[in-house]
Amino acid sequence: MNASLQADPDRLLQKVVAGTAGDIGEGFFRALVKHLGEALGVRYAFVAVFPGAPDCVQKDRVQTLAWWSRDGYLDNIEYPIAGSPCELVLAGETRLFCDNVAALFPAEEEELRALGAVSYLAMPLFDTRGEVMGHLAVIDDKPMQERPGDLSLLRVFGARTAAELERRAMDESLRRSEARLKSILESTHDAIVVVDGAGQVTLCNPAAEALFARKADIMLGAPLDRLLTTPFTQLKQGCFGHSAAAGGRPASLWAPQGIQARRASGEAFPVELTISPSTPVADDGQPQLFTLILRDLASREAADRELKRLRLTASYLRAEVEQAFDLDGMVTRAPRMQKVLANVQRVAPTDSTVLLTGETGVGKELMARAIHRQSRRADKPLIKINCAALPAELIESELFGHEAGAFTGAVSKRIGRFELADGGTLFLDEVGELTAAAQAKLLRVLQEQEFERVGGSRSIRVDVRVVAATNRDLGAMATAGEFRGDLYYRLNVFPVRIPPLRERREDIPPLARHFLARNARDLGRALTDLTPDSMDRLLGYPWPGNVRELQNVIERAAILADGPLVSIQDVLEPARQTAMPAAPATPEETTTQAVAAPLAAMDAERAHLQAVLEQTDWTIEGEQGAARLLQLAPSTLRSRMKKLGIRRS
């Protein structure tokens, strides 16, 4: 150390003060360690603090804010304090190790010798609460003597450093608070406007811009009276009245109605308003700022009406579903159907994917609802989609949703069926009609429970149980390359085949009477039963349209009935009747029937479809179309017509 400086501690202090006087923040720390090191004539000087956020300080290590050596500044480092000279200092003690410091700390001996450290002097830095924040230290490559002037200098600049650290922490805290306030103001749906005592707007959030249809730069500095039909002076007086009632403390005024706001176009609309005076007051005792929170009453009332409507609709639909689709109340006495219901009851409580197969009209959707109602997801939605009822280009959007601008006509974001069914069940009807692209996305959802919206890049995770249904042979389609084999095996976890009505003819009488009772109730007529001849005709018909067709036949007969006994007259055509076998068939007959039965069923279905098409003058779509009478999707009807070779002559 310079001998003259050693002899005059005041000059030493002045030197360091002069070197750091013009700096604050990070510049102060660098200037401090440089001038402190030079003034004390040591090899190194540094200031270090505990790392981490103010509410999560890591007190087992420190990081340097500035590190100076005789050869220039060094890069800042972070290191653990255990076993180092710093450990004692950071416990709250000023320490001087005059010589051989490396040998005194074996855990850090290698690092200290690499620095050429021989002596070490450091003092802790305390905040205003008396908590240690870090330390100020010097290291020399030669022994140091204990001199009162050196310790005094450290104490003076230790206090200055601690003050700068606290100022730094306060700045960081202020930045965090401002960021949080900005986030709150920008994210809230309520319009927030701050005005000064004269009624001039000093702050507004994006919701206020949307509410008043004005940009912030237009509102800032403008009088509040341009935004409200009620003068600001009147609102302020209301606040003062509430403050007086509260014993002089600042109090808020809430006006749930009676206040009109004004948009840029001049349109006035009702708002709910809360105005609150700030705590700081001017010299005359008046509040300096007022905060207004506003809500559009017209929009809220419309939203409340829509919410009420949706709740009523949901309640109505839930009641309808519970009334119409009760698994325990399914009308069946056929052993085959009883076995199906037993399997459904076993699989329903699980999350396994179910594949329902069967001909058109056997009740696949009814079975899907029963599975959902008996599952642990019964309190969540059952969302359904008919994959054959949508154009190929819209199936992906319906299933997975799309982002605004994803394709022509996508003017806004759309939530897909998978997101709507999150936590519940998704019923994919006619899943065999999915496009190849939709099949690939569906496979990923089944495997990973995540997907992206059409036009989006963010993965969305869902928890959805899938129940699929088809009247096609997916296995054969997969073999022929018409359906993804890996998707087929994912869907076919628990297959449930619902037998057609001709394979459970013992269900025809109870089903017919069930539908007749329901039609009697709906029509308000006393319809007690079917005539014996009519029941025989129902039992002899092959029912290519299955339960759905039987339901339609009974409904038409009920409408045409003249008395309590309902007769099936011209509803079933003789050409479509087939006789039931009188006795069990021989093995040879069984083989012949196995070949002939599908052909007979196709002939019966062809005749039935052709009859309905002729009845509607070959109109397929619309209220009076064949698809509506057959309760089929128009695309499904066209597909069946093509398969059966039905053409208008």
Image (cartoon, helix red, strand yellow):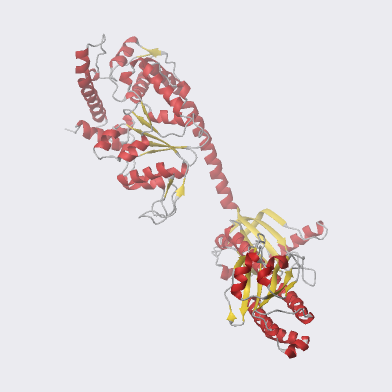
Look at the picture and state if 117 lies above or below 338: below
Res 225 seen here? no
Question: Left or right of 370: which side holds 88?
Answer: right
**Residue at image x 69%, y 76%?**
119
Q: Nearer the viewer, residue 254 or 456?
A: 456
In the picture, residue 528 is in which quadrant? top left
Residue farthest along the bottom direction in this orientation: 4
Q: Residue at x 69, y 55 (%)?
A: 255
Q: Position of residue 398 (x, y in %)?
A: 39, 45
500 lies left or right of 516:
left
The answer to whether residue 483 is seen in the rendering is yes
Residue 362 image point, x, y percent: 35, 26
- Quadrant in the picture for residue 478: top left
- The relative height of residue 632 versus residue 204 in the rendered view (above or below) is above
**How many numbered markers are drawn?**
0
Left or right of 131? Residue 464 is left
